[in-house]
Image (cartoon, helix red, strand yellow):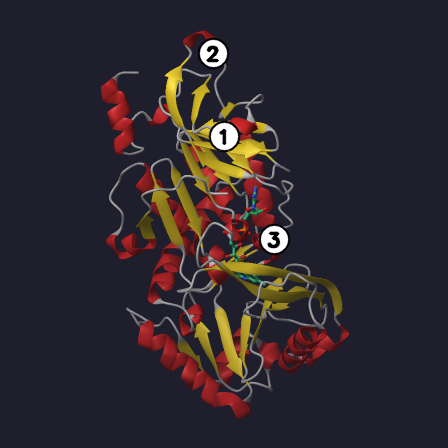
Amino acid sequence: MTDNQVQEMERGFSTRLEHCEIAIVGAGLFGRTLALALLLKGFSVTLFDKDSVAGTESCAFTGAGMLAPYCELETSDPIICALGEDAIRLWSDIISNLGTDVFLQNSGTIVVSHPTDHFLLNQFQARVDKKLVDQSAKLVWLDTAQLADLEPSLMPRFSKALYAADEGQVDNRQLLSALAGALVEHGCEWKADSHVHHIRKVTITEIDESRASDTPALGLQYPDYDEDQQADRVEYQHHAIPKCRYEISVGAARYAFNLVIDCRGMGAKNQLEELRGVRGEMLEVHAPDVVLTRPVRLLHPRYPIYIVPRPGHRFLIGATTIECEDYRPITVISTLELLSAAYSVDPSFAQASIIETRVNCRPAFNNNQPLIQHSKGLIQVNGLYRHGFLVTPKLVSLLLDFIESKPIDTRFTGLFKEEKQVATVC
Ligand SMILES: Cc1cc2nc3c(=O)[nH]c(=O)nc-3n(C[C@H](O)[C@H](O)[C@H](O)COP(=O)(O)OP(=O)(O)OC[C@H]3O[C@@H](n4cnc5c(N)ncnc54)[C@H](O)[C@@H]3O)c2cc1C
């Protein structure tokens, strides 16, 4: 490799991408979606996760999969809405190319309140409208007849509602599974059950051509690396890779890559200042007598809830938003509140069977916005909070533009932050 080529590599990731070995740490929602996008662009990708391929421990496995850019505006910033509007369109493309059925629904969200709480509907609309850049028909009022037309089973308990027609939902677990299938099909090297203990910056000073292997590298492994020496100068064994930047360690094994993308969600808690976990609890019920066809949000002064219908008369009822990093099973009080609120939306929930309770913590920064923090050879994506499904495809497409040194949509440049020195990530 010539000095010029090394200098080109120093400038960014765009040069000699055909030799760029990429590692993604964290095969949750963001890591999987990103891995597939990179593979489809022709990159070589190795995916590390401490969990199984099913991803049952990820926040994404718990999430409700609602794609609600307008309803979320009540409490989120307009940038989340802008990401989400684009992402909803992108999900359709991604899912249609997965080759497996994934339940994706685009029939809107209904927002209701009990008659005594109608002021909450007005407040909700005012808060959302204030933040909407283009207010044209994003959130419309439904009168009794219109509501009865869309969701007859809400009658006669609710007389008016708000309707966000352009919202939707995706089945989170089907999506994770279909992404996994597509990743394997497209040649992703998936290192499941691999807890990454260190992501460490290394400097390559010596290339030992005699030890170079002709085997295409899926990252470079140092099985006999001497842990005690902890030197930041290591030799690498494959001449095809122009410049290694970061080394990943899983147990005794070491791997080196030109680019490491850290998507560990709450797993990065100790390395990312400000990252916090926000507990969310949810129940899944089987309710053959309930006939709701799209997500319904109930505004309530004490316990607002959403009900997300899934095929097979299954309904997700959620979710609490509790400011604490607590992974213990759902509490009695949360169960009582969620189920009472659901029962008040439709008394037929009384005979439902509780199939599952779900708990996880959403990874969030102080501003509740995602962040793409980058230095040479390392990118950390985190803080998806309660909007992971809503924003991921757009965030992935922005990150691809960044990696390929294409111009970034100026509406979203504030989500990127350069970090000068990142020596050890974990
Ligand atoms: C109750 C609840 C409801 C939600 N509902 C919605 C919703 O309706 N709509 C929406 O848009 N969002 C929703 N979310 C939020 C959404 O689930 C998250 O924003 C999203 O899952 C975050 O994605 P992620 O890829 O950053 O993290 P995760 O999905 O958690 O993935 C992180 C991955 O990193 C792996 N990992 C961590 N540490 C290591 C390590 N050291 N080595 C190797 N692997 C590691 C983990 O095993 C995991 O697989 C909800 C969340 C909760 C809890």
Distance between the alpha carbons at the discs numbered 3 and 2: 39 Å
* Left or right, residue 178 beside residue 8: right
Ligand 1 under 8 Å from disc 3 Cβ: yes
Quadrant including the N terminus: top left
Image height of 186 relative to 280, above or below: above
Query: In the rendering, at what x and y percent does residue 109 appear?
Result: 49, 69
Q: Secondary structure at mark 2?
A: loop
Tell me which label, 2 or 1, sits earlier in the chain. 2
The residue type indicated by label 2 comes to Asp
Tell me which label, 1 or 3, sits earlier in the chain. 3
Distance between the alpha carbons at the discs numbered 2 and 1: 28 Å
Query: Badge 2 is on which residue?
Result: 214
* Left or right, residue 117 beside residue 356: left
Query: Can see residue 11?
Result: yes
Q: Residue at x 57, y 60 (%)?
A: 361
**Closest to the observer: 135 or 77?**
77
Q: Residue at x 61, y 36 (%)?
A: 194
Between circles 3 and 2, the one closer to the viewer is: 2
Q: Residue at x 65, y 41 (%)?
A: 52
The residue type indicated by label 3 comes to Phe
Query: Can see residue 101?
Result: no
Query: Badge 1 is on which residue?
Result: 230
Query: In the rendering, at what x and y percent does residue 304 appear?
Result: 56, 78
Residue 10, numbered label: none
Query: Badge 3 is on which residue?
Result: 61
Image height of 94 relative to 254, above or below: below
Toward the bottom, the furthest residue is 116
Between circles 2 and 1, the one closer to the viewer is: 1
